[in-house]
Image (tube, coloured by chain):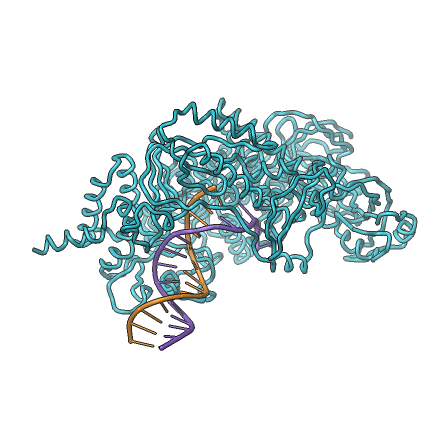
Chain colours: A cyan, B orange, C purple
Amino acid sequence: MEKVFEFVPVDYDYFDFEGRNYVKMIGRDGAGRKICVVDSYDANFYLILREGYGADEVLKRLKTVEVKKAGRVTRVLKTEILDKNFLGEKRNAIRVWITNHKDGHDMASAIGDMEEIEFRREYDIPLVTKYIKEKKVEPLQHYCVRGQGTKSRESEVGAARHTPNTLNFGAGRWSGVGLDKLDVEKCFFAESIESLKKEKEFTPKILAYDIETMSREVGEGEILMISVFGNGIRKVISWKKIDDAPGYVEVVEDEAMMIERFCEVVRGASVDILCGYFSDGFDLPYLKARADFHKVKLDLGIDGKGPSFKRGRIASGKIAGVAHVDLYRFVDAVFSQYLQSETLSLDEVAGELIGIKKESFDFSRLGNMRGRDWKDFFSYNLQDSAVTYELALKVWPDVAEFCRIIKEPVFDVTRDRMATHVENHILHNLDRFDEIAERRPGHAENIERKMKGKFEGADVFEPTPGFYENLVMFDFTSMHASLIVSFNISGQSLRFVDDGNCYVAPEFELDGKELQIYFDKKPGFFSTLLAEVVKKRKKFKGEYAIDKSAMKKARSNAYKLLANATFGYQGFFGARYYSREAAAATLAFVRKFHGDTMEKIAGEGYKIIYGDTDSIAFLKEGKSKKKILDFLKRINVGLPGIMELDLEDFYSRGIFVAKRGVKTGARRGVAGVGAKKKYALLSEKGNIKIRGFETVRRDWCGLTRDLQDRVLKMILKDGNEKEALKLVKDVVGRLRARDVELEDLMIRTKLKRDVGDYVAEGPHVVAAKKMIEAGVSVSAGTFVEYFIGEGIGKRVGDRVYLAGERVKYDIEYYLKKQVLPAVEGIFDVFGVDIEAVVEGERQKKLF
DNA sequence: GGAGTTCGCATACC
DNA sequence: ACAGGTATGCGAACTCC
């Protein structure tokens, strides 16, 4: 029977039936029921004809082409001759409809080289992406579906999987596909899907989970407990039987039953999003390994199947019918840049984003657990899921907004990196420009692109070390993006000759050659789409200023991120729309506008103190704020296109230091020794901004970071170094008296490679080797933590010790290599030789 | 075998 | 493999005599 109903797709998958492609979407209907909608997909790709050639010969050839593979035969089903655009040029193209998407690549190859065909395109876009692109059935949007469905399920959710619904897609034709076994309320075959153009937000049901295990190695050792939280569920499942366990603990017989029960709970919850934290890399593969070990099913999916792991740099765990989200991956890709958190542990990230401080659990207790310990552990486990759930709620608006803008499903949007986001955003909007998509670079092309060296980047103005008062900072808003838009910078608009309708790029050097290039003024899709992003970002930034809701903030951020990454995309070797010239030219423009603006500011009589890429800091010189803002306005009038110079802030004080190892001495206050990317400012409103100093570097010990932080703040607030000097003396005294906690002396770094792959054996590598010796698994990405102790040996690495080793810390090392170097440059600005002062104190004391 | 330099590495800024 | 270049600064490893 035909039905008409509302539908919001959340999760996408596809399957083959009789050799053809179908897309299976799981989402909610108007009544909030979880349903499945199946839609057909007609696979196709394009042949772009060479200028001046007709289609006849090609069409003849197409009739004969076929590909036999995996038990199916793919043929050309129909063709269409179209006027399309490719890279902004009008082109004649043949759209070739074939039996199966998977054979697109082989079909394109089978057609072979023909004089008439210049390009073959769009056979390399993943099926779901191409489906969404062509049929415009976008994730989390509202649709009206007309379709053939089944009768309502009679049973309640909990027992649902034992009483599968029956399908009736025309005389049982579809049995065997497995749709009848799906654990959903209803399943439909779509006859039409129309957009409802509703601006209503979709609120998903979310369930978070977390496991606690005996081992940190996936699959080694038992899973002790599994917690689930969300959508009314708050539970720990465990096989550990203890007296008076908390009510939320559900005790089962053994590990195998615990896994089975977990699956039951997940399926029964019938949520839209199942989320974990680092679950792609740990929880889900661990569950899979233990389920395999016990030979039980990890049937989390609505099809009764276990997760599949899509290969990639990190395997992605896909579960049928529910969007499995690993929040860590989304946080890593989208937020980490803007976070203070140094490790991206759930603990830190949750602390920063939602202000929840988790209670910790001492894992060394694992060896000898008593009733009390188990209770703590259950509580800890439940809390992890609860925090993951809260984080999911917090981050959901951003996920939803990315889905909306980029038009990719939740599963992908939470795992893709920036380059992919930018590219998908372009792909999904190409139809508006009648554009055929460019292909991905081939293997050889990839290597060739990577071989080419870097291109010249932005300028950094070298500051003169000193303590300054009354500063102003200007910066360009989204500088790279606004340049790309204002000068239509892209591969397709690139010209080597100016036909009189071009923007002229500043001359720049690329691969040893001076280049003068131009960009056609006729806007292409690249800059048009970016212009939209920048415009929307501006609009949403304004809306957020009025209404500080999470949604508004997410919107604003999402567009900002997308705009920022677009420049990098053009220089990224894996990009479909890669253009070295465009990327290099953008940077040439950046240098020009930054330089010209600095000149303009200096020309007005201001002294420039610093500038990095898109910012300029200068002295107020007693001028009023109004005068400076008027000047800013005047600069803006002269800026082209959508470029905009903004007031970053007014600062009452600022300190810039010399590079390390440069004793300014008599040359204090002289140019030529200033450190770039290292400064501290105090805004007129009282906010402190510290950049580049050890304070903000996670690979320096806490004692050093904390001391430097306090010294900087004190100096900025006091306006002199007197009090700060006392502080340093005090810390040095405590260090010498061994009155410093070891915890404050630990040095942390993150291994970038596996231990065996290091060429040089630095202290962190020595520490890593010690950890391995102690039985800890260590690989690229692991954080190592060590301190420098007393001992013999030339290298610092010879005195590396792990926490817990009973060795005295090396006073000299921490003094000469940590504490003093970090404050030396700061005091040098005031003409104070901190080392001499500290040494003098010591002499005094010795007397 | 010590001084000076280069290189490898981690992390920051924008 | 999953945006780009610029920059600081440590410590190991090399070069040179």
Q: Is residue A413 left or right of residue A523?
A: left
Residue A805 figure quarter = bottom left
**Where does residue A758 sit, x and y in percent of width and height?**
45, 65
**Where does residue A320 sit, x and y in percent of width and height?**
62, 44
**Where does residue A424 sit, x and y in percent of width and height?**
65, 42
Residue A340 figure quarter = top left
Residue placed most toward the observer, A839 or A120: A839
Q: Name the residue at 33% across, 30% down.
A: A686
Q: Is residue A706 left or right of residue A109?
A: left
Q: Is residue A749 left or right of residue A840?
A: right
Q: Name the residue at 41% across, 47% down.
A: A676
Q: Name the residue at 69% across, 45% down.
A: A494
Task: Point out the image quarter for the N terminus of chain A.
Answer: top right
Q: Is residue A292 left or right of residue A792?
A: right
**Where does residue A699 sit, x and y in percent of width and height?**
37, 52
Task: Point out the image quarter for the C terminus of chain A.
Answer: bottom left
User: Can residue A703 be spotted in the picture?
Assistant: no
Total count of labels: 0
Residue A463 figure quarter = top left
A491 shown above or below A32: below
Residue placed most toward the observer, A586 or A138: A586
A814 shown above or below A138: below
User: Can residue A22 be spotted in the picture?
Assistant: yes
Residue placed most toward the observer, A377 or C16: C16
